[in-house]
Amino acid sequence: MLVLDEDRSTADIVRGLLPSSCEVVAASDVDHALALLVERDYAVLLAELSHSRDDVIGMLKWLKREAPQTSTIACSALRDGRVLIELINQGQIFRFLPKPLGRELLRRALIAACERYGESRAAPQRLRRVAVEPLRRDHSLPARLLDYFRRIRENARVRQ
């Protein structure tokens, strides 16, 4: 599980809610999260939207295209309905949680996201139903970053 939040205590809260066998990795900014996502796949991404919101949204769109099996939980204290509707309608997020995070609500969302990941691994054909359109160059994450991480992923595939 990957937790993207500038507040490091969020990752500690997640660790406390999950069994010790679940690895929780923390990233405090989009660049670090993208570097981690390029290195390996994660079952769940918990992402705070208010920190560099446009970059996070661009990253979520990239992730949904590149790793559709990853379940994304977005959380935010901001109530930007336009952004949430866009993300939900495009299938970018599995759940949205308002901040401050309630422990029980977060625990249930994490369990549901892990179960969804397991289902997608067991029946990969289901991922075609949630496929997203290719990204356009005009989205919020700069095109040069997308190209950079696309090349890194391609290099990683070649090395395998």
Image: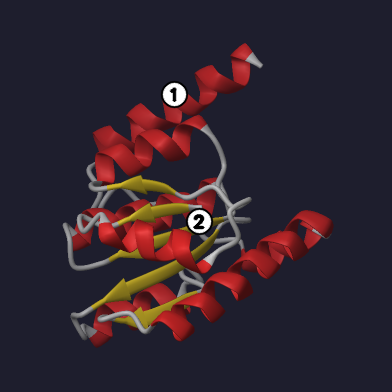
Q: How many marks?
A: 2
Q: Quadrant of residue 148?
A: top left
Task: Look at mark 1 in the image and give the residue it sits on.
Answer: 152
Instruction: Tell me the amino acid under the disc marked 2.
Output: Lys
Residue 76's place in the image compared with 48, above or below, is below
Residue at 31% across, 55% down: 58
Q: What residue appears at the point 54 percent right and 70 percent down from the top-left corner?
A: 110
Residue 121 coordinates in the image, percent (x, y) = 76, 54
Of callouts 1 and 2, which one flags the residue occurring earlier in the amino acid sequence? Answer: 2
Contact check, label 1 and label 2, Cβ < 8 Å: no
Local SS, label 2: helix
Where residue 22 appears, x then y in whole percent?
A: 59, 52
Foreground of the two, 11 or 54: 11
- Whether 159 is drawn above or below 3: the answer is above
Left or right of 15? Residue 147 is left
In this rendered view, identify the residue nearer to me: 131 or 149.
149
> Is residue 115 among the parts visible in the rendering?
yes
The circle drawn on residue 64 is: 2
Residue 132, x across and y down, in percent:
54, 61
> Could you classify mark 2 by the number of other residues whose Cα lies within 10 Å: few (under 14), some (14-19), or many (20 or more)?
many
Query: 143 or 153, which lies in front?
Result: 153
**Mark number displayed over residue 46:** none
Compared with 2, 73 (above or below) is below
Q: Residue at x 36, y 57 (%)?
A: 11
Left or right: 66 in relation to 137: right
Residue type highlighted by circle 1: Ile
- What residue sits 37% from the left and 84% below the top? 102
What SS does tag 1 mark? helix
Q: Nearer the viewer, residue 44 or 131?
A: 44
Horizontal side, residue 129 vs residue 123: left or right: left
Q: Residues within 10 Å of mark 1 (few under 14, many from 20)?
A: some
